[in-house]
Image (cartoon, rainbow, N blue to C red):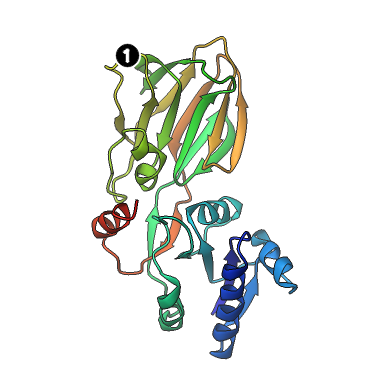
Amino acid sequence: MKMLLVSRIDSSDVLDYIRQLGADLESRGHEVILEEETAGLLGLPGVPILSASPDLVVVVGGDGTILRSIQRMERQVPLIGINWGEVGFLADLEPSEALDFLLALSKNIRCEQRMRVAFSRDGMNLGEALNEALIVTTRPAKMLRFSILIDGVVAEQFRADGLLISTPTGSTAYAMSAGGPIVDPRIQGIVLVPLAPYMLSSRPHVISSDRRIEIKLESARPADLVIDGQRTVELGTNDIIEVKKSASPALLVDAGQNFFAKVDRKLRRM
């Protein structure tokens, strides 16, 4: 099997681990290639994710490293995360168990499709998120005014410090910290969570992904759209952002973990 190894690059310990992991996998007959930034720090040849064409992407790091890897894929391929971060909701393996798990995989990798959300403005794609996108003012301590349109009807209008648009996968991330619900990742829905709304009646919504969802900015202040913490898009004061289910879900390798048991276990670490 052809495996691409990607690592967080701010720790010598994790780089030592991934060097050894790659050697162990190669000794068992797998083809191992290193993502170019990871390879550069190890003094070895590497390739960009875009041109790698692996059967499996193995990411060693936290959720940020996994999200960045998924953002950089032109075509989604199976991915498994090895947790080397704080909590790691997206990383199903611990370093001590990863080698045995990877050696037991066959080419028929069983994956769980995780819905991503696509954002567009005036018909132009702005990006896709596995966790969430944040609309926030570019000026600190200033509120924004939003209108939420569902199937062309104004469903809510409010003022807030910002707005989170989350997937079910992202419901255990920023959205949860902002008061949103934990959502089963098998549900095809989009979570909207106002950040510090002016009126207490402005509450989180979970909306079916087959509805037409639009977010209209109605503010004199500019704002940014931050996608998975990896990409920032400047928004105008009257922009309308269309939110819809992406046609290309992320493919997370099924490591046999129950979602709710994992959430309970990881939340106890916080």
Where is mark 1, residue-wise? 199
Number of numbered discs on residues: 1
* Percent of width and height locating residue 159: 41, 14
Between 70 and 24, the one nearer to me in the picture: 24
* Percent of width and height locating residue 34: 65, 71
| 185 relative to 166, above or below | below
| 86 relative to 45, above or below | above
Name which quarter of the figure residue 89 lies in: bottom left
Which quadrant holds the N terminus? bottom right
Between 59 and 267, the one nearer to me in the picture: 267
Which residue shows up at 30% across the image and 28% down it?
204
Q: Count residues near mark 1 (Cα–Cα under 10 Å), then give few for <14, some for 14-19, many for 20+.
A: few
* SS class, disc 1: loop
Name which quarter of the figure residue 147 lies in: top left
Evaluate whether residue 96 shows in this view: yes
Identity of the amino acid at label 1? Answer: Met
Query: From the viewer's perspective, is 266 left or right of 21?
Result: left
Query: From the viewer's perspective, is 172 left or right of 52?
Result: left
* Percent of width and height locating residue 261: 24, 59
Between 198 and 76, the one nearer to me in the picture: 198
Name which quarter of the figure residue 15 lies in: bottom right
Evaluate whether residue 209 shows in this view: no
| 227 relative to 137, above or below | below
Which residue shows up at 51% across the image and 56% down it?
66
* Percent of width and height locating residue 179: 31, 33
Query: From the viewer's perspective, is 187 left or right of 138?
Result: left
Which residue shows up at 56% across the image and 39% down it?
127
